[in-house]
Image (spheres, helix red, strand yellow):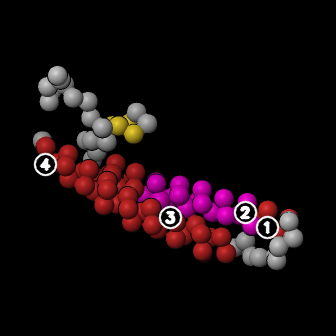
Amino acid sequence: MPSAQTRRPHTVFGFPLAGFSLFQSLLLAFASGFFTFFASTCLAIFALLAWNLIGGHTVNYADTYRYVGFPAGVAVLAIALPYFGILWLRAKFRR
């Protein structure tokens, strides 16, 4: 049975989820919101493109930013800021 000292930290895709500084935590939170905004907007634009090609009503592509990209980015940012903030606080208090 491994002791507590030899236990490996939790990882996501090989990246450790421990020991982030405040700047790194904020950078990761905003980067995840930024990426989500652009990824969801891209998917929404392609979905509207397909809708227009199959004969649906013509819609404004700018609506994808307002109704899909922005809410998704803000939602991920609202989840990521407390999550990475808690990871930062855990690292501060473990020292």
Task: Name which residue lies at 27% across and 35% down.
Answer: 9
**Foreground: disc 3 or disc 1:** 1
Mark earlier in primary sequence (4, 3) = 3
Contact flag, marks 3 and 1 (Cβ < 8 Å): no
Q: Amino acid at mark 2?
A: Ala
Q: CA distance from mark 1 to mark 2?
A: 6 Å
Contact flag, marks 4 and 2 (Cβ < 8 Å): no
Classify residue 3 as left or right of residue 39.
left
Q: Amino acid at mark 3?
A: Gly
Task: Name which residue lies at 42% across and 63% down.
Answer: 77
The crowding category of the residue bearing disc 4, from other C-alpha atoms within 10 Å (few below 14, some 14 to 19, many at least 20), is few
Contact flag, marks 1 and 2 (Cβ < 8 Å): yes
**Helix, strand or loop at disc 2?**
helix
| In magenta segment, residue 53 | no
Q: Quadrant of residue 5?
A: top left
Contact flag, marks 2 and 3 (Cβ < 8 Å): no
Which residue lies under the disc numbered 4? 93
Q: Amino acid at mark 4?
A: Phe
Relative to 93, does residue 12 appear above or below in the rendering?
Answer: above
Which residue lies under the disc numbered 1? 51
Magenta-colored segment: predominant secondary structure: helix
Residues rendered magenta in the picture: 30-48
